[in-house]
Image: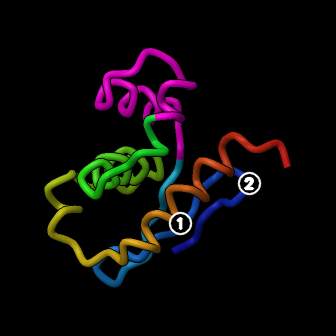
Amino acid sequence: TLHNRARGEVLLAIDGRERKCCVTLGALAELEAAFDVISLSQLSERLGLLTAADLIVVLAALTAGGGEPMSAAELASARIDPRAAANAVADAFRAAFDDA
């Protein structure tokens, strides 16, 4: 799967297929609503305390942001390496918010 690193896209293997994940404004708004926070700083704090169920919610938002949406239910039943998922989420947020 082609992806655009400059746009902040990262790849994650889901059911053996590389899928694009990306932090977009829509993904951020979805996560703010899902975690009932009112600011990006609160969201950042909340993301530091992710459960496995939370990680699925984040992946659903990021796969939609990457243009390859998957529902939380689809992600919950998919084969995904938990460490790879956590790393992809961290990489996507770094790409979106780091200046370097």
Q: Nearer the viewer, mark 2 or mark 1?
A: 1
Q: Specify the amino acid type for callout 2.
A: Ala
Residue 6 image label: 2
| Residue situated in front as seen by the camera: 45 or 60 | 45
What residue is shown at x 85% (from left), y 50% (from top)? 100
Q: Position of residue 53 (x, y in %)?
A: 24, 52
Helix, strand or loop for disc 1: helix
Q: Specify the amino acid type for callout 1.
A: Asn
Does label 2 or label 1 sit earlier along the sequence? 2
Q: Is residue 46 left or right of residue 7?
A: left
Q: Is residue 97 left or right of residue 31?
A: right
What residue is shown at x 17% (from left), y 61% (from top)? 74
* Residue that numbered label 1 is attached to: 87
What residue is shown at x 37% (from left), y 44% (from top)? 61
Q: Is residue 53 left or right of residue 95?
A: left
| Residue situated in front as seen by the camera: 75 or 2 | 75
Q: Is residue 20 above or below residue 82?
A: above
Magenta span: 23-45
Helix, strand or loop for disc 2: helix
Q: Quadrant of residue 26?
A: top left
Q: How is the image coloured?
A: rainbow
Q: Is residue 32 above or below residue 88?
A: above
Residue 96 image label: none
Count residues near mark 1 (Cα–Cα under 10 Å), then give few for <14, some for 14-19, many for 20+. some
Q: Main secondary structure of the magenta part?
A: helix
Q: Position of residue 68 (x, y in %)?
A: 37, 56
Report how far apart the C-alphas of labels 2 and 1 lie in the structure. Answer: 18 Å
Look at the image and say whether residue 85 sits in the magenta stretch: no
